[in-house]
Every structure is written in structure tokens, then in C-alpha cells.
Image (cartoon, grey):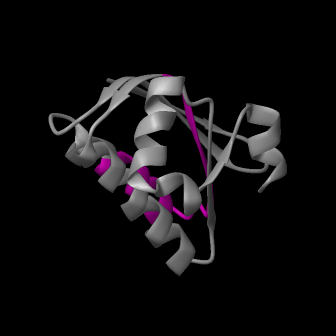
């Protein structure tokens, strides 16, 4: 999996490409929490190139959401492919996370 981070005037946009699974979840968590440690409070996760997410990947998203909430920040996700969205739906995460269809909609939530 690859991670691309883009800092904008409104948020840090984190693009995830490939698979977020138990093999790379710890490194991904360290990367995104590193943004929060560095002062980022508005993070947008771009899932448009994410092909697969496991329960370990879901945990990364949940940990990030909780950390941002504790710091007074906000997390928005966008661009989920149907099979990834289904995982979020089945897990109940769609009900507790801010998920938008596109980048513009996600940034408007910040």
C-alpha cells in the first residue's frame, strides 16, 4: 500500500492506494497519527484508490477518528469503492463516520 499526503489550506488529505490490512496497518496508523502529533486537526482520507480494507484497517480509521475528536479535530472520508463501502456499512462505521462521495464534498465538511 502507498500513502500520499497533501496539505491544503483546509485539511491534510491522505490518499490510500492498494490494500489496508494487518500487514501494513501499524505503519499506516503511525503515519496518520504522526500528522495529528504534528498539529493536523482536519484530516480527509481519500479512499478512491483503496482496493481492500481488513478489520485491522478499520481499527486504524477508528483510532484516528477518536484521536482527532479528542484533539478537537475532524475526520472525513471520501471516494469509497462499493466493496470497501460495504465493509464500512456491515461494520456499522458508516453510521459513526463522516463519509462523502467526492473530494469537494469532503472538504466542504471541514
Residue shown at 74%/31% (left/top)? 102
In the displayed structure, would residue 109 be above or below residue 101?
below
Residue shown at 56%/30% (left/top)? 80
Residue 78 point in image, percent of width and height: 63, 37
In the image, 80 versus 11, the foreground residue is 80
Q: Quadrant of the C terminus?
A: bottom right
In the displayed structure, would residue 31 be above or below residue 50?
below
Q: Is residue 40 magenta?
A: yes
Q: Quadrant of the N terminus?
A: top left
Residue shown at 81%/40% (left/top)? 105
In the picture, measured across the screen, residue 85 lies left or right of residue 1, that is right
In the image, 21 versus 27, the foreground residue is 21
In the displayed structure, would residue 28 be above or below residue 23?
below
Residue shown at 49%/63% (left/top)? 65
Task: Specify start and end residues of the magenta stretch as a single range.
Answer: 29-49
Residue 28 point in image, percent of width and height: 32, 42
The answer to whether residue 48 of the structure is visible from this angle is no
Residue 38 point in image, percent of width and height: 49, 61
In the picture, measured across the screen, residue 82 lies left or right of residue 63, that is right
The answer to whether residue 31 of the structure is visible from this angle is yes
Residue 39 point in image, percent of width and height: 55, 64
Amino acid at each position: 500500500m502507498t500513502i500520499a499526503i497533501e496539505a491544503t489550506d483546509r485539511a491534510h488529505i491522505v490518499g490510500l492506494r492498494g490494500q489496508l490490512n494487518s500487514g501494513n496497518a501499524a505503519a499506516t496508523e503511525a503515519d496518520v497519527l504522526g500528522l495529528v502529533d504534528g498539529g493536523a486537526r482536519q484530516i480527509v482520507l481519500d479512499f478512491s484508490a483503496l482496493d481492500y480494507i481488513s478489520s485491522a484497517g478499520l481499527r486504524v480509521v477508528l483510532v484516528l477518528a477518536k484521536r482527532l475528536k479528542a484533539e478537537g479535530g475532524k475526520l472525513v472520508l471520501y471516494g469509497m469503492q462499493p466493496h470497501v463501502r460495504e465493509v464500512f456499512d456491515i461494520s456499522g462505521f458508516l453510521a459513526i463516520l463522516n463519509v462523502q462521495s467526492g473530494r469537494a464534498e469532503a472538504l466542504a465538511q471541514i
